Amino acid sequence: MLSTMSVGRICLAAHFRGFSIWCNFEIERDERGRADFLRLDARRCRLLAHDCVRRDAPFMTLLDKSGQRSILVRTIYDVNDPQQTSDLSIRYAGHTGNAGRDSIAAPPLAVHSAILQRSHPPSRTTHMAAPEEINADMLAFWNGKGGDTWVARQEHTDITLTPVTDALLAFAAPRAGERVVDIGCGCGAPTLEFARAVGPSGRVVGLDISGPMLAEGERRASAAGIANVDWRQVDPATAALDEYDLLTSAFGVMFFGDRVAAFTNMRRGAASDARMALVCWRTLAENPWMDVPMTAAAQHLPPRPKPVPNAPGMFAFADPEHVTEVLTAAGWAPPRFEKLDMDLDIAAGRGLEEAVVQSTQIGAVNSWLRNQPAEVVSTAVASLREALAPYADGASVRLPGAMWLISSAPV
């Protein structure tokens, strides 16, 4: 075999039925530059393939170190002999974008073969299911440029959403000494408030798939002298949860590929008298703070695909009937819904131009403008600024926001 040289490192995550395994790999190119290989740790390879066989969905997403390139890998294996997996072979690779708030626009990473090749014919193949693809794309986005951007903009976002955090805290009513799990905790602004509320005798576990955002949350906790939070980079849809008294989330439960499976898993950690308290967005039409800039930018861009009702995304929990179906199917009591309406300062007290920056740096408008010609971006931003100007009031730019406060309990 030709000698090889390392040209980079990647993280591999296998996603199947919401289950995830993470592995580190090296990308190598032979000395003639003819092929790229993946060097797998044999022990982890066996574990990975065995679980794929057992779970019946061998799909993997490969990310480069920056997280800005990703490929979907479809493997073939011998289902009748799950222990013989050191010959796991990559049979297909293709670029996948993000299914969430932004997209990842980058060329595919070339992978022609794996070092470990199959010594006997495979017995079957499987095909990518939508939930696994969604989960893989979320992982790619939140651990790459998307996660870094949200960390950079988080202070601004936290100021905008402070009244929402306050409302969720009052709604959830955490008590001293309670054990709290925060789903999709991100950079942890609500997490830290819950930690303060339960006090030193209580404990909060913040769960998220984004390494950059969890690191920021841990940094904030340390700076504030808050020591009763555990920050864990796991997929709440599949990870085993510690026993808890309160399950909460601020806009973190709408993105699961299979929401019933996710809430079923999360219910397993509930104490006998546990409760759940969530805040989620209502419809786009009820949220001018998003709708106004989106409408202003959209007039300069190609038509967007019609949204799929209840699809994973910001508005997946906008329909109470759908939310009720999901939660009751997952073993939760029929939820109670309470409307939360308030004006949100999308400038965070920093003026109109900062509102324009925030509206174009994160969220849907950012993904729409990415890779557009400079003149299109400039025109769209000008229209967005004009649309927001009537809402400016001194250093604030306030537009209505509409949310659901949702409560339930395991049954």
Image (cartoon, helix red, strand yellow):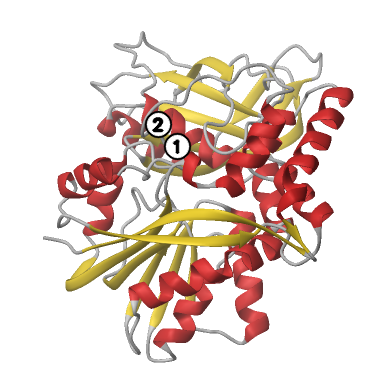
In the displayed structure, 180 sits above or below 407; it is below
**Residue placed at 88% from the left, 24% from the top?**
375
x then y, percent, for residue 176: 35, 89
Distance, label 1 to label 2, CA atoms, is 5 Å
Q: Tell me the amino acid under the disc marked 2.
A: Glu
Q: Tell me the amino acid under the disc marked 1.
A: Asn
**Residue placed at 44% from the left, 23% from the top?**
87
Quadrant location of the N terminus in the rendered image: top right
Q: Which quadrant holds residue 336?
A: bottom left
- Disc 1 crowd, CA 10 A, few/some/many (<14, 14-19, 20+): many
x then y, percent, for residue 110: 68, 18
**Residue 288 in sight:** yes
**Residue placed at 33% from the left, 16% from the top?**
126
Rendered image: mark on residue 132: 2
Q: Nearer the viewer, residue 134 or 289?
A: 289
Q: Which quadrant holds residue 211?
A: bottom right
x then y, percent, for residue 201: 38, 91
**Residue at label 1?**
135
**Residue 27 in sight:** no
Left or right: 153 in relation to 403: right
Asked if labels 2 and 1 touch by Cβ distance under 8 angstroms, the answer is yes
Left or right: 399 in relation to 338: right
In the displayed structure, 397 sits above or below 107; it is below
Q: Nearer the viewer, residue 167 or 79?
A: 167
- Disc 2 crowd, CA 10 A, few/some/many (<14, 14-19, 20+): many
- Residue at the extreme front of the image, as rendered: 390
Rendered image: mark on residue 273: none
